[in-house]
């Protein structure tokens, strides 16, 4: 059942993807970190409601090619904001495993709780190529949530 849910979730991710073409270059680790820092600053200065509305905007400043910001609850792994796919908002991904069986959202929470910020590696559907690919997301704790943005490693 867990595997079926992952692939159903993967399909939802791909269907809800913003318009990026297969010729777009991959975002860089530096760009991902910068987007996370800007989103964290926005949450801190404007509050969650205003910041989440900006982060959720697929044509806003937190979506760029295959880069997008997401915000997740540290309590239960629920997606609170997502620049690439509003269908994930309100869903807990805490028990979702990647293609290799890794509980990657739990790993992100662990990273944010233990170090405040850092990189987590996992496999996730690429919104541009529509394939499962190696990905690394930078996550940063902001109060009771973490902000993340990932880069595909291919």
Image: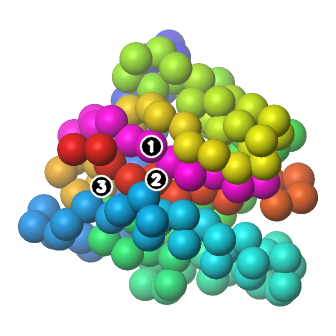
The residue nearer to you, when weighing 77 against 37, is 37
Give the residues in magenta: 131-141
Residue 14 % position (x, y): 32, 51
What colouring style does the render use? rainbow
Left or right of residue 94: residue 49: right
What is the crowding at mark 3: few (fewer than 14 residues within 10 Å), some, or many (at least 20)?
many
| Residue 133 part of the magenta segment | yes
- For this orientation, the residue located farthest to the left is 23
> Callout 2: 10 Å neighbours few (<14), some, many (20+)?
many
- What mark, if any, has residue 103 been given in the picture? none
In the rendering, at what x and y percent does residue 108 appear?
65, 38
Q: Which of marks 3 and 1 is in front?
A: 1
Contact between labelled residues 2 and 1, with CB atoms less than 8 Å apart = yes
Mark 2 residue element? strand
Tell me the quarter of the picture where residue 51 sits. Answer: bottom right
Marks 1 and 2, Cα distance to the nearest angstrom?
Answer: 5 Å
Chain-order first, disc 1 or disc 2: 1
Marking on residue 127: 3
Q: In the shown orientation, is residue 63 left or right of residue 92?
A: left
| Residue 40 in view in this figure | yes
For image coordinates 47% across by 34% down, the residue present is 121
SS assignment at label 1 = strand
**What residue would you read off at disc 1?**
136
In the rendered view of the protein, which quadrant contains the C terminus?
Answer: top left
Q: Is residue 127 above or below residue 105?
A: below
**Upstream in the sequence, badge 3 or badge 2?**
3
Secondary structure under tag 3 reads loop
Q: Name the residue under label 2.
A: 150
């Amino acid at each position: 059942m867990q595997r079926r849910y992952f692939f159903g979730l993967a399909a939802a991710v791909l269907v809800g993807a913003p318009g990026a073409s297969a010729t777009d270059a991959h975002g860089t680790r530096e760009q991902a970190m910068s987007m996370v820092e800007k989103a964290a600053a926005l949450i801190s200065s404007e509050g969650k409601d205003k910041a989440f509305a900006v982060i959720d905007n697929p044509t806003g400043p937190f979506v760029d090619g295959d880069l997008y910001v997401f915000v997740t609850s540290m309590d239960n792994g629920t997606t609170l904001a997502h620049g690439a796919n509003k269908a994930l908002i309100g869903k807990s991904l805490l028990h979702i495993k990647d293609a290799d069986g890794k509980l990657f959202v739990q790993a992100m929470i662990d990273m944010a709780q233990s170090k405040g910020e850092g990189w987590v590696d996992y496999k996730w559907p690429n919104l541009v190529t529509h394939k499962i690919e190696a990905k690394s997301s930078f996550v940063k704790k902001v109060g009771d949530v973490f902000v993340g943005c990932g880069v595909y490693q291919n």
